[in-house]
Image: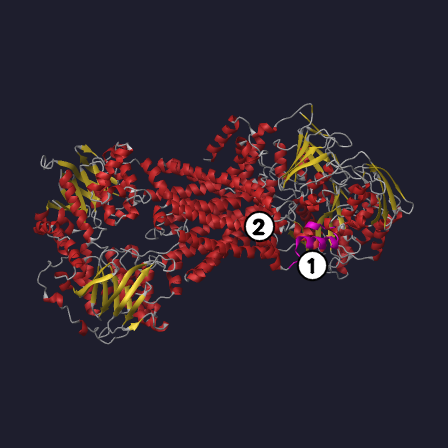
């Protein structure tokens, strides 16, 4: 019955991780997904890592930068469960403190980038002129692989956690901007939006009352995905020497050091790597369970 | 073959029960037997279990469904048969045709490929033989230029042609039983009539027994030999078509038949009441419910003056006309039905009135004022007098809000009264659409389709519009629900006195609610006039053909109509 | 799925007609005739900077393709003949006459003459090549090339480090200088000829059969540019390389402990790691604070834990064979936190405020990071808070040249292993006129210029003592350690040499099977 | 179709030109000066001035930009400042290595994904799905550099069956069997996450397709499920997967930087890292522009392949 041909690009921008997502209708809330199975496992993993990070200073036997005389790159022992690094520091303690750097990146930089992206996407996508401009700008940002952007921005700001944060924000803006744009495009065609437009609702009303609430779910899923990506970015940037400033540890910089010393101290990277994998795995499980709940 | 064993049973379904994880079983106890060469109609409203019954026969139930009872084909038990054995039966012995021809075909494979694939599944491996047989099949389902069509993709065919291809697929391996699940529901009436005739001819030619699953009593009356009425997973009544229509025994069957809307017989005498529902000019909104802006009585609620609408971007050279030079007036308090087949532009015209599509040429006047020429503030004010009810009850309410909030939204947008007053108004509106006030707290998913359309109506009426655009508001509803919603609509319209553009493909519905009717075809206006006059004595040939094609829910008149159609 | 694929790949590797790994295992046992040496280098060559001594592959190229007029033995400063057979310095030290070999030809076949010496020195004097000894080369003002096989050089003033220049200066071919700048041809007189170069990846050399010292044993050298030290180690272990120039100190240490590998440590081609101070920083303008920092540097720990023993702790830049070396002076700054603390307290008592001081270092090399963190930890103990400020090498060098470091930095310098004056006039951190520390002191300037403008080999030891005294008194540049270059090879590689310039020498090298 | 293509090309060109100006300006704003990097700490001011003039960095911005555009148009990119050699040949060599590696990984990932996802859908077993899902998640959750290092440690150092890194000594085409062994470890490390992502996407796409009415039609005709998956569902799932493949290609190029670092693979990733660190403007600006062009072309190619795979778009020009 509908005889409307929507002029859209030939390739639709993929919304969630899967094709053929039906419109979000009747199903239990997303929170339900986090209380069962995979979602619960993910939540437990992330929760455990967060807890370790928050309680780090209480649990750590040594300070993050404390150099223990004579303990140069020794293997795991009762005194140092994960051994020490080449500057005589306790790796367990550094790992616990290092989690905090990643938590900042994950739970501060990603939401900031997401919020900026959502805001930009919402505001620009309603009018075709701003939409085109914003889309081209997003394209430009996306045109650079994440690490190239990281290397470039580090050249500007110097290495450090702040730079990692800036890179992640810069990466997430187009991701969320595009996601929201797709949501705007989909939701504004919905009959209930048309019904409110007919009686005189303006763009801001529709964006605030209908588009934003209805795109929260795909945004939540993306948020979890982006957080796991952020852990990677921190790791990869630290791996290339662009990460957190010494002597402060981050999981990525610990892995980098561990990898550098893999031959002499194979135990080094194990702890930090396990934490990274747990964190990423947890976030992935959460995002998977959320997107499955969305489709159910 | 047809007369050899006229009463031999080919398919026997006994005490079939199908259950899901949900508490209520989809099918509770259904027993149906199909005789060779007959057309058996399975009739029922949504949720009656008619489709599930058919799917169970071929083992095509959705995952998680459990079936019990017995389904025997030619004495062989089908229920619980492993997939490989079912594949022997499927398509070869029993074939099935589905409701939606748009999606029933693989969009990226040619018609020929799909036919060959169906033939290959049952042993015809030779490419040439398969191609020849495919042409033969397309010819059998009366597709013109079958050789050329083999290379076509589904999207290059019309809806009716697609359904013919689906039929050809089903008939490819000469099955003895054809299960047709709402085969004509998605089609225009004229196409529907052609497909029904085709089914009838196939039955006569091949002796295939057909199970016709439908909710449309007109279709049943037109073609079925016997009828089985289902309700909530149980058989209510069963009998010869003529007998059942003439003397329904069960109350449910009676209601079902009573809900069916009927058109007047063509060329009958026009009833005066239908001609003059009430003089439009004198139809001023009731004094108790003053509209936001009371128009002068002679100013039409909406007027189209030579409007054109194009779809697609003209700049990119892809524009095609959806509406061409239409002029139409809707007087205050008048209900004008817009009818036509798909692509006729009726929906577009409705959306144009609501300001949802851009105007290419001409003028649209709301209460005598040109909306597009009006200044911003004025446009907003004019919009207040407008409301829109959408076709799809699934999507017409925001799933994130309680329905009370949805009803309140127009009041919130225009900041009408205090929040408490708005809530009171919501209760009032719920009452007006005959729903308890407690429903305000419910989510759309907790309501049935009919209830949702009532809510949509309540929201539309929140600002006391002068013009309501209703786009197929009842076409997704079951007949009995539809009848009640239409009754409510008519009642509210009379009480509140709003004008209405009522868009529908169902002529009987329009006949029921509209004062005047406008017939559209290919974006152009064919005919307008009082509904009684137009439907009884159409002036345009097209209107007549349209009316002719509507199946009449009266098997007694079948013979006559068949003769008429044949001529 | 990964497991499945890996299994398949193993099968492929096992079944394939030629295995990439087996192909690489070609050795053990007796001396092999010829053969190509596969070398891993960290950096590529840059033709326009070919005389800057700035990368390992440039060093390898210069050492293999070119000869110099004289050679210093690795750990001495006594010139030995090379292309020049003998030389004579005038009494006032402003003229040098050299006798040249007459049996030498360039790889192009053209005979080597005194004109080539003049051309080479003039090329080095041209600022566009950014040669470190440019000032010394530019101080050579007269060339007498009347004899093809002898040359007399005239100096603007006595040049105590002229033999340093002649040791470093490769004799280049004037005809192919344009191709050299484009990286298309490197024509010299050395034991190997330049064969091909794929930028960023590979440089290869072939044996020079007509080498004047005799034919080298190797057929050729293939240099792979591998910027990641770890990858070099992996490839050495996997028999993809025979010799690697770049590995971490720790890797060299552990390779040295294995029987399959041999690690060379070259005394005589050293560099120095130091902590620089900006003396205009209010806290660092007090020499007591700078001395305190010098006392708080745990040089021994840096040498042991960071350089894994391939370094020597120092207070002054000179190696022990240098004429300026003074054992007592070099031991001035022993690690002494109490002394340091006392100095800091004293300065603080005199009203010197010590805020948190940034410590800048290049982020690319983990060595600097490790030293910086040790320094930071020790300084914290004496009451000096330090904030680490890793920056990209490019930014660090720009700050060094512009003298823009806010407070402290860690870097390396070179040239202390040559004639002491070379350091004083050529190494930027020590430049008496303008240096990164912004340290301006007339007495220091006088001492530095004094050791330069003297006759080679005849510098008054008292002048060196004066220079040392000035360096310690100013303490604007706090030496940590002399670092010794290393390379590692499989035990099938024999007789690898090294020049004082840091160039690996493969003239004598051979492989065993 | 043609009109649509022209429209897309136009906007792609605009993006590229804007990007070129942005990149050119941006790289010059980065702190750190190529001249000091080149000249080294001990160079005299005269040396530095000579280098500055030689590199043309003393000219005004727009003149430098125009010069660069001219060079680009003539495809003569001039010499690199720091890395040595002609920028064109540097990039050509690096690009060959990166493209071979990335394409190898892409083929590995897409063929692998095709096999694993169809297997998962055709043999719809609970244990198989759980296993694949677990492997999948693991492949995504372990960072690329970690996988790469473990692969080196196991297959090159502990059990030396494959090369630890580097490119095949004789190039890729003289001994394909040797080249394959050199490609295997870095290719695998690079491909694993993409493989997992594609498998996940394709599996979901196939499952979605299997719920489509045309599949029910086919089943009702007695066509076996496996055949439906292979001949019908897969064909329908491909167009959308191509788009994802395009995105994955970009991700792979990004991931190549890490893998190239671990495997000493002389590719573009290494080039850009060194280029930026040395402030080697000619190298960096061309590489950044190249990455924009590749991104734009990938999108374009994705659209075209999508259009070509979908007869609705191919024959009608509109979706």
Q: Quadrant of residue D56?
A: bottom right
Magenta highlight range: D38-59
Residue D124 visible in the current orientation: no
Q: CA distance from mark 2 to mark 1?
A: 56 Å
Q: Residues within 10 Å of mark 1 (few under 14, many from 20)?
A: few
Point out the image quarter for the C terminus of chain C. Answer: top right
Is residue D51 magenta-colored? yes
Is the residue C387 above or below the residue B39 in the image?
below
Residue A200 visible in the current orientation: yes
Is residue C374 magenta-colored? no
Give percent across and percent down for residue C408.
Answer: 71, 54
What residue sits right under mark 2 in the picture? D74
| Name of the residue lying farthest toward the right | C91
Q: Is residue D250 left or right of residue C180?
A: left
Q: Do the residues marked 2 and 1 share a common chain?
A: no
Q: Secondary structure at mark 1?
A: loop
What residue sits right under mark 1 in the picture? C355
Relative to the observer, which residue lies in front, C292 or B231? Answer: B231
| Subunit of label 1 | C
Give me the residue at 50% from left, 48% from top.
D294
Give percent across and percent down for residue D246.
Answer: 45, 46
Give percent across and percent down for residue C28.
Answer: 66, 24
In this rendering, which labeled residue sits more in front, label 2 or label 1? 2
Q: Is residue C286 left or right of residue B398?
A: right
| Name of the residue lying farthest toward the bottom | B296
| Subunit of label 2 | D
Q: Secondary structure at mark 2?
A: helix
Give percent across and percent down for residue C47.
Answer: 68, 44
The mark total stands at 2
| Name of the residue lying farthest toward the top | C30
Relative to the observer, which residue lies in front, B23 or D101? Answer: D101
The answer to the question of whether label 2 and label 1 lie on touching residues, with beta carbons closer than 8 A, is: no
């Amino acid at each position: 019955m509908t005889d409307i041909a929507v002029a859209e690009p030939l390739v639709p921008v993929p919304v969630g991780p899967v094709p053929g997502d039906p419109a979000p209708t009747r199903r239990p809330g997303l929170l339900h997904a986090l209380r069962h199975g995979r979602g619960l496992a993910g939540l437990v993993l992330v929760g455990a890592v967060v807890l370790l990070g928050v309680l780090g200073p209480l649990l750590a036997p040594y300070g993050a930068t404390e150099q223990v005389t004579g303990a140069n790159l020794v293997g795991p022992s009762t005194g140092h469960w994960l051994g020490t690094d080449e500057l005589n520091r306790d790796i367990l303690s550094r790992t616990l403190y290092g989690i905090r750097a990643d938590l900042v990146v994950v739970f501060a930089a990603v939401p900031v980038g997401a919020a900026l992206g959502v805001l930009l996407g919402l505001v620009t996508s309603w009018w075709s002129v701003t939409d085109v401009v914003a889309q081209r700008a997003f394209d430009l940002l996306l045109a650079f692989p994440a690490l190239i952007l990281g290397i470039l921005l580090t050249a500007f700001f110097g290495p450090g956690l702040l730079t990692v944060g800036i890179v992640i924000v810069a990466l997430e803006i187009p991701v969320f901007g595009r996601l929201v744009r797709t949501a705007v495009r989909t939701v504004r065609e919905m009959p209930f939006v048309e019904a409110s437009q007919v009686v005189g609702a303006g763009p801001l009303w529709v964006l605030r009352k209908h588009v934003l609430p209805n795109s929260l779910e795909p945004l939540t899923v993306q948020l979890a995905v982006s957080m796991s990506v952020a852990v990677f970015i921190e790791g990869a940037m630290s791996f290339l020497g662009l990460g957190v400033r010494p002597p402060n540890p981050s999981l990525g910089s610990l892995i980098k050091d561990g990898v550098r010393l893999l031959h002499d101290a194979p135990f080094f990277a194990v702890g930090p790597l396990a934490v990274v994998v747990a964190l990423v795995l947890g976030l992935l499980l959460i995002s998977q369970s959320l997107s499955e709940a969305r489709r159910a | 073959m047809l007369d050899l064993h006229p009463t031999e049973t080919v398919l026997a379904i006994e005490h079939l029960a199908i259950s899901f994880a949900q508490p209520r079983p989809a099918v509770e106890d259904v027993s149906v037997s199909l005789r060779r060469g007959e057309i058996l109609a399975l009739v029922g409203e949504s949720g009656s279990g008619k489709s599930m019954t058919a799917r169970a026969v071929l083992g095509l139930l959705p995952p998680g469904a459990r079936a019990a009872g017995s389904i025997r084909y030619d004495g062989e038990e089908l229920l619980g048969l492993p997939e490989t054995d079912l594949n022997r039966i499927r398509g070869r012995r029993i074939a099935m045709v589905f409701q939606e021809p748009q999606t029933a075909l693989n969009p990226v494979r040619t018609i020929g490929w799909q036919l060959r694939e169906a033939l290959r599944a049952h042993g015809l491996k030779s490419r040439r033989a398969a191609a020849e047989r495919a042409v033969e099949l397309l010819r059998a389902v009366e597709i013109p230029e079958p050789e050329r069509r083999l290379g076509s993709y589904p999207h290059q065919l019309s809806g009716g042609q697609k359904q013919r291809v689906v039929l050809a697929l089903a008939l490819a391996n000469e099955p003895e039983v054809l299960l047709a699940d709402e085969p004509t529901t998605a089609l225009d009436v004229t196409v529907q009539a052609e497909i029904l005739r085709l089914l009838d001819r196939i039955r006569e030619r091949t002796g295939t027994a057909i199970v016709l699953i439908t909710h449309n009593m007109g279709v049943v009356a037109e073609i079925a030999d016997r009828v089985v009425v289902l309700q909530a997973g149980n058989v209510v009544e069963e009998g010869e078509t003529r007998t059942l229509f003439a003397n329904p025994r069960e109350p449910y069957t009676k209601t079902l038949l009573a809900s069916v809307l009927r058109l007047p017989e063509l060329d009958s005498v026009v009833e005066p009441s239908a001609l003059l529902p009430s003089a439009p000019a004198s139809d001023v909104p009731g004094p108790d419910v003053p509209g936001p802006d009371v128009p002068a009585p002679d100013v039409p609620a909406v007027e189209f003056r030579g409007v054109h609408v194009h779809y697609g971007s003209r700049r990119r050279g892809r524009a095609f006309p959806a509406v061409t030079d239409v002029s139409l007036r809707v007087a205050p308090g008048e209900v004008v039905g817009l009818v036509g087949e798909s692509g006729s532009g009726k929906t577009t015209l409705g959306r144009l009135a609501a300001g949802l599509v851009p105007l290419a040429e001409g003028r649209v006047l709301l209460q005598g004022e040109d909306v597009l020429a009006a200044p911003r503030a004025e446009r907003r004010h004019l919009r207040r007098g407008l409301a829109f009810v959408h076709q799809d009850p699934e999507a017409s309410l925001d799933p994130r809000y309680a329905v009370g909030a949805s009803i309140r939204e127009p009041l919130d947008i225009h900041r009408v009264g205090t929040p408490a007053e708005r809530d009171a108004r919501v209760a009032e509106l719920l009452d007006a659409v005959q729903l308890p006030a407690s429903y305000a707290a419910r989510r759309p998913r907790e309501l049935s389709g009919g209830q949702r359309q009532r809510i949509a109506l309540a929201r539309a009426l929140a600002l006391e519009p002068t013009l309501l655009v209703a786009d197929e508001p009842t076409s997704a509803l079951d007949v009995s629900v539809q009848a009640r919603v239409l009754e409510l609509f008519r009642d509210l319209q009379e009480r509140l006195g709003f004008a209405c553009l009522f868009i529908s493909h169902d002529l009987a519905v329009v006949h029921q609610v509209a004062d005047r009717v406008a017939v559209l075809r290919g974006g152009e206006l064919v005919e307008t006039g009082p509904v009684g006059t137009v439907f009884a004595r159409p002036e345009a040939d097209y209107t007549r053909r349209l009316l002719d094609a509507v199946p009449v829910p009266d098997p007694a008149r079948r013979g006559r109509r068949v003769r008429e159609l044949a001529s | 799925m990964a497991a499945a694929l890996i299994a398949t790949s193993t099968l492929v590797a096992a079944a394939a007609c030629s295995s990439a790994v087996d192909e690489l295992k070609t050795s053990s046992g007796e001396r092999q005739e010829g053969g190509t040496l596969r070398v891993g280098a960290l950096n590529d060559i840059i033709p326009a900077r070919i005389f800057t001594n700035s990368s390992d592959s440039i060093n390898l190229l210069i050492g293999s393709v070119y000869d110099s007029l004289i050679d210093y033995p690795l750990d001495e400063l006594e010139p030995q003949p090379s292309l020049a057979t003998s030389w004579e310095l005038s009494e006032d030290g402003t003229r040098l006459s050299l006798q040249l070999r007459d049996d030498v030809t360039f790889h192009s076949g053209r005979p080597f003459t005194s004109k080539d010496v003049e051309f080479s020195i003039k090329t080095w004097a041209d600022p566009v090549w950014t040669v470190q000894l440019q000032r010394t080369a530019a101080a050579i003002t007269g060339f007498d090339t009347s004899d093809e096989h002898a040359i007399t050089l005239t100096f603007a003033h006595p040049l105590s480090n002229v033999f340093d220049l002649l040791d470093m200066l490769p004799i280049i071919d004037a005809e192919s200088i344009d191709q050299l700048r484009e990286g298309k041809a490197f024509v010299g007189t050395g034991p190997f000829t330049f064969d091909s170069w794929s930028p960023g990846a590979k440089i290869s050399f072939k044996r020079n059969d007509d080498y004047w010292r005799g034919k080298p044993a190797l057929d050729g050298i293939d240099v792979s540019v591998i910027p990641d030290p770890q990858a070099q180690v992996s490839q050495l272990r996997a028999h993809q390389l025979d010799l690697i120039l770049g590995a971490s100190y720790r890797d060299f240490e552990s390779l040295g402990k294995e029987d399959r590998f041999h690690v060379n440590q070259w005394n005589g081609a050293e560099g120095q790691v130091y902590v620089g101070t900006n003396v205009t920083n209010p806290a660092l303008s007090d020499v007591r604070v700078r001395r305190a920092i010098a006392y708080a540097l745990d040089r021994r720990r840096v040498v042991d834990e960071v350089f894994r023993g391939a370094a020597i702790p120092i207070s002054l830049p000179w190696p022990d064979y240098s004429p300026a070396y003074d054992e007592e002076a070099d031991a001035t700054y022993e690690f002494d936190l109490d002394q340091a603390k006392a100095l800091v307290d004293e300065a603080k008592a005199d009203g010197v405020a010590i805020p948190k001081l940034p410590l800048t270092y290049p982020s690319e090399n983990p060595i600097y990071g490790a030293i910086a963190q040790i320094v930071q930890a020790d300084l914290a103990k004496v009451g000096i808070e330090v904030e680490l400020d890793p920056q990209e090498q490019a930014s660090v060098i720009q700050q060094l040249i512009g003298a823009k470091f806010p407070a402290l930095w860690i870097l390396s310098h070179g040239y202390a292993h040559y004639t002491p004056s070379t350091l004083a006039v050529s190494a930027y951190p020590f430049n008496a006129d303008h240096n990164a520390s912004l340290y301006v002191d007339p007495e220091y300037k006088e001492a530095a210029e004094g050791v330069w403008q003297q006759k080679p080999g005849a510098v008054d030891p008292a002048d060196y003592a004066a220079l040392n005294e000035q360096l310690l008194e100013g303490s604007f540049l706090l030496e940590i350690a002399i670092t010794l270059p290393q390379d590692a090879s499989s035990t099938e590689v024999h007789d690898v040499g090294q020049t004082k310039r840091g160039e690996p020498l493969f003239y004598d090298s051979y492989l065993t099977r | 179709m043609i009109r649509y293509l022209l429209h897309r090309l136009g906007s792609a060109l605009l993006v590229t030109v804007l990007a070129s100006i942005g990149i050119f300006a941006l790289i010059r704003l980065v702190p750190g000066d190529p001249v000091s990097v080149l000249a080294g700490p001990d160079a005299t001011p005269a040396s530095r001035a000579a280098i500055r003039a030689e590199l043309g960095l003393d000219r005004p911005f727009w003149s430098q930009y125009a010069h660069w555009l001219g060079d680009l148009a003539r495809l003569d990119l001039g010499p690199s400042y720091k890395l040595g050699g002609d920028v064109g040949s540097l990039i050509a060599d690096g690009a060959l290595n990166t493209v071979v590696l990335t394409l190898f990984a892409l083929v590995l990932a897409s063929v692998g994904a095709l096999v694993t996802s169809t297997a998962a859908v055709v043999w719809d077993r609970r244990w198989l799905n759980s296993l694949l899902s677990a492997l999948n998640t693991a492949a995504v959750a372990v960072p690329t550099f970690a996988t790469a290092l473990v692969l080196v440690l196991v297959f090159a150092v502990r059990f030396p069956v494959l090369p630890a890194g580097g490119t095949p000594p004789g190039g890729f085409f003289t001994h394909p069997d040797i080249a394959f062994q050199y490609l295997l470890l870095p290719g695998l490390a690079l491909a694993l996450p993409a493989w997992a992502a594609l498998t996940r996407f394709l599996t979901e796409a196939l499952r979605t397709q299997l719920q489509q009415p045309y599949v029910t039609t086919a089943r009702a005709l007695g066509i076996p499920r496996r055949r439906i998956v292979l001949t019908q569902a897969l064909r329908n799932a491909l167009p959308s997967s191509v788009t994802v493949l395009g995105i994955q290609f970009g991700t792979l190029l990004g991931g190549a930087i890490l893998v190239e670092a671990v495997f000493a693979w002389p590719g573009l990733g290494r080039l850009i890292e060194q280029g930026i660190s040395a402030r080697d403007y000619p190298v960096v600006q061309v590489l950044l522009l190249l990455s924009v062009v590749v991104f734009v072309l990938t999108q374009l190619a994705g659209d075209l392949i999508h259009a070509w795979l979908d007869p609705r778009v191919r024959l009608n020009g509109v979706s």
